[in-house]
Amino acid sequence: MKKYILIIALLFGLNQAFAQNNNPSQEGERGGPELISFNFCLGYGMPSMDFWNDYYLDRNGIHDDFTGGIKYDLFVSFKLTQDVYARTGLGYWSEKVKGTDESAFRSVRISFTSLLIGVSYEPEYIQLGPLQPYIGLQSDMYLIYNSFLDRNNEKSTHNGEDISFAGFFGLSTEFNRVLLGIELKYRFGSYIQDVRRIENIVEEKVSIAGPEISLRIAYVF
């Protein structure tokens, strides 16, 4: 429930910013959100995956751990008000661990595809040389895909969905309509995984809390 309250609060804040920008106080000021840039982020995400690493993999004879994987984000950025920006787009993260001939599975892959929405504060009066610092909050609505390849090369899959949140800090610089930057995130959240134990299905909580680091490149309109 708390996750959905935070989503509502974030959307309400964006709505208030839209409303403020649609009612400019100065004559001639442009109203409404302004499309600013098209962005691509390539990085590395390290979610905790505690249930898998601390219990499930070892119990099934897999001595590898989920330690991190490549993270992709593709989003557009809008200017809402002075120094306040919104972003919305898609993200993808995936990692695979491998077993041995004695393991219950040859491999286990977990993938997250996400719809992201966020807001950032980029104060123009603060500059670090050519770099513009910014901070923000982002929410990701995940589609979770688990794939298991057993010793007979038969694949089984499980799907689910959940929500996470991340705070982020970034530095960027712009030249000739190209923006380059680096972005650091720390993600909070977890999801519920159904697991079969003997003849029962039980629910296990999987933490996806952890850091992400990304390089950002954008085309500025």
Image (spheres, rainbow, N blue to C red):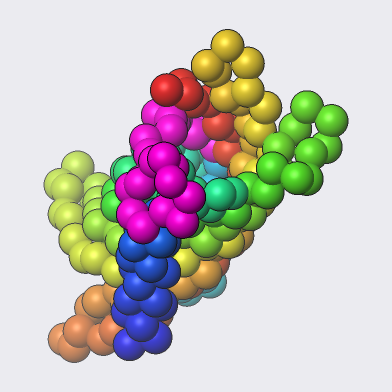
Q: Quadrant of residue 93?
A: top left
Vertical relation: 101 (above or below) 11:
above
- Which quarter of the rendered picture does the N terminus lie within? bottom left
Answer whether residue 37 is magenta in the image: yes
Query: Where does the image place residue 72, in percent across and percent down from the top left?
Result: 43, 37
- Which quarter of the rendered picture does the C terminus lie within? top left
Q: Tell which of 164 and 118 is nearer to you.
A: 118
Picture residue at 33% right of the left edge, 54% below the top: 22
Q: In which quarter of the image is residue 79?
A: top left
Picture residue at 39% right of the left edge, 86% below the top: 2
Q: Tell which of 8 and 183 is nearer to you.
A: 8
Vertical relation: 210 (above or below) 7:
above
- Left or right: 133, with 164 as reference point: right
Query: Which residues, given as a range, are shown in magenta?
Result: 22-43
Residue extending farthest top? 176
Query: Where does the image place residue 3, in percent across and percent down from the top left?
Result: 38, 79
Answer whether residue 211 is magenta in the image: no
Picture residue at 52% right of the left edge, 69% below the top: 188
Residue 165, can we see it?
yes
- Left or right: 207, with 90 as reference point: right
Query: Where does the image place residue 73, in percent across and percent down from the top left?
Result: 41, 39
- Left or right: 186, with 13 as reference point: right
Vertical relation: 34 (above or below) 201:
above
